[in-house]
């Protein structure tokens, strides 16, 4: 495995690093100020559209679309591999509230675009994928439910019932990311079309539900550790009451929902881990800057042994995680998502857990400033901690990974 960056990656890294310095970091404070003046807290600040326009002009657009879904005649992405995209996603993770959106590489849109590209009909791609690729609309993925343990996808209770030429949807979802954003125009909804089927992994299907469909109610915004995540479009509770859509809105085939979900989550998990490493790098930078600028008990905080230990441990941890993520990206490119199954689970277990600890140490070095709105650390911590639940909690991945290890000896 050769993890040296090739010429294309180096070119894009240099361009993206310059874009971050010149446009994204200065825009963080501007976006916060503009958000205070918006009619709705869920509207996007003007600066976000300006960032998107500049990113597109510079060719930093839809980079997440790996080459197998980026045929030249399809107009998807930059035709990168996972290994090429990994260091770019890491850079965007340094400003997760702005950078991924600016590059049209933000979840849940990325996963939804991949689903439509892989499983959507030509009509579905034209109506929904094309405007998503252009950054003209946003989307949401409605899977998690409050009444059941959604870490087990077979528990999903939302019903998708066939009625003539339509499907009728009934159910309640929550923590549906991006749903509060007024630009969110389409939902991919996971529900059961065959709740009594013998194969519990063939009971679920996915279907497209436009936001303005009668019976779809975005009931309220859900907070995450007290944050409303305005920059991500919030996380909503949604109720579907006799929501009727054409049968042509079904994605793939009936009973294919579980398989589509797994195909969607593989890339999503590695994208999250890539960005988390960027978050950790920013935390280390902030921690070091703070440590050399403050004194306590007669010497710089940077001279305190415990702080030096934190910084050293953080650097070692980040280097280890990066190698594991790069190996995973390489395996996804060479052996496919199934061939990288163990590594995808490993990074999903290791990365959020370790990055939360690094962020916690950075908060500690900042004292009261670390938990304040004057530094990004508290919000970064909340986001990283949430990723120990998103796309499957740690324990689910540990369970599956342990079974694969034990299988060798049974």
Image: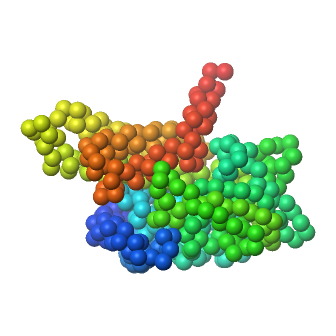
**Occupied quadrant, residue 393:** top right
Place of residue 64 in the rendered image (x, y in percent of width and height, measured from the top left):
49, 62
Percent of width and height locating residue 164: 91, 69
> Which residue lies most toward the right here?
164
The residue depicted at 78 percent of the width and 67 percent of the height is: 243
Q: Would residue 71 be seen by someone viewing this image from the given angle? A: no
What x and y, as percent, mark residue 257? 73, 54
Residue at x 57% of width, y 67% of height: 180
Foreground residue among 387 and 236: 236
Q: Is residue 185 above or below residue 397?
A: below
Q: In this view, does 258 lie to the left or right of 270?
A: right
Asked if 305 appears above or below 21 in the picture, the reply is above
Q: Quadrant of the N terminus?
A: top left
Q: Where is residue 385 in the image (x, y as percent from the top left)?
A: 46, 45
Q: Residue furthest top?
A: 409
Which picture quadrant has residue 297?
top left
One can see residue 202 in this view: yes
As drawn, is 250 to the left or to the right of 368? right
């Amino acid at each position: 495995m050769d993890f040296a960056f090739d010429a294309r990656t180096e070119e894009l890294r240099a361009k993206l690093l310059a874009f971050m310095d010149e446009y994204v970091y200065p825009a963080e404070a501007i976006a916060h100020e503009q958000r205070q003046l918006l009619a709705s807290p869920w509207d996007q600040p003007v600066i976000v559209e300006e960032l998107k326009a500049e990113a597109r002009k510079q060719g930093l657009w839809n980079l997440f679309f790996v080459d197998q879904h980026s045929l030249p005649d399809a107009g998807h992405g930059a035709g990168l591999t996972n290994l090429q995209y990994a260091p770019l996603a890491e850079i965007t993770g340094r400003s997760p509230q702005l950078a991924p959106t600016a590059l049209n590489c933000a979840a849940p849109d990325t996963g939804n675009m991949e689903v439509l590209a892989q499983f959507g009909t030509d009509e579905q791609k034209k109506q929904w994928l094309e405007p998503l690729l252009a950054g003209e609309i946003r989307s949401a993925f409605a899977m998690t439910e409050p009444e059941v343990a959604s870490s087990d996808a077979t528990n999903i209770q939302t019903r998708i019932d066939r009625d003539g030429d339509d499907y009728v949807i009934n159910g309640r979802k929550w923590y549906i990311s991006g749903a509060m954003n007024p630009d969110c125009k389409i939902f991919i909804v996971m529900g059961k079309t065959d709740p009594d089927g013998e194969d519990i992994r063939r009971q679920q299907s996915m279907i497209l539900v436009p936001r303005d469909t009668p019976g779809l109610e975005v009931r309220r915004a859900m907070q995450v550790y007290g944050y409303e995540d305005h920059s991500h479009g919030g996380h909503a509770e949604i109720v579907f009451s006799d929501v009727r859509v054409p049968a042509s809105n079904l994605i793939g085939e009936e009973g294919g929902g579980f398989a589509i979900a797994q195909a969607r989550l593989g890339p999503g998990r590695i994208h999250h881990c890539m960005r988390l490493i960027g978050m950790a790098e920013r935390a280390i930078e902030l921690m070091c800057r703070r440590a050399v600028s403050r004194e306590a008990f007669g010497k710089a905080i940077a001279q305190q042994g415990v702080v030096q230990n934190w910084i050293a441990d953080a650097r070692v941890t980040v280097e280890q995680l990066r190698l594991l993520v790069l190996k995973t990206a390489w395996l996804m490119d060479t052996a496919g998502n199934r061939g990288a199954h163990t590594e995808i689970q490993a990074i999903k277990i290791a990365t959020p857990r370790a990055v939360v600890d690094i962020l916690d140490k950075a908060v500690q070095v900042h004292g009261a400033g670390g938990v304040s709105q004057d530094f990004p650390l508290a919000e970064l911590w909340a986001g990283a901690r949430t990723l120990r639940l998103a796309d499957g909690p740690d324990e689910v991945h540990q369970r599956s990974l342990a079974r694969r290890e034990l299988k060798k000896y049974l």
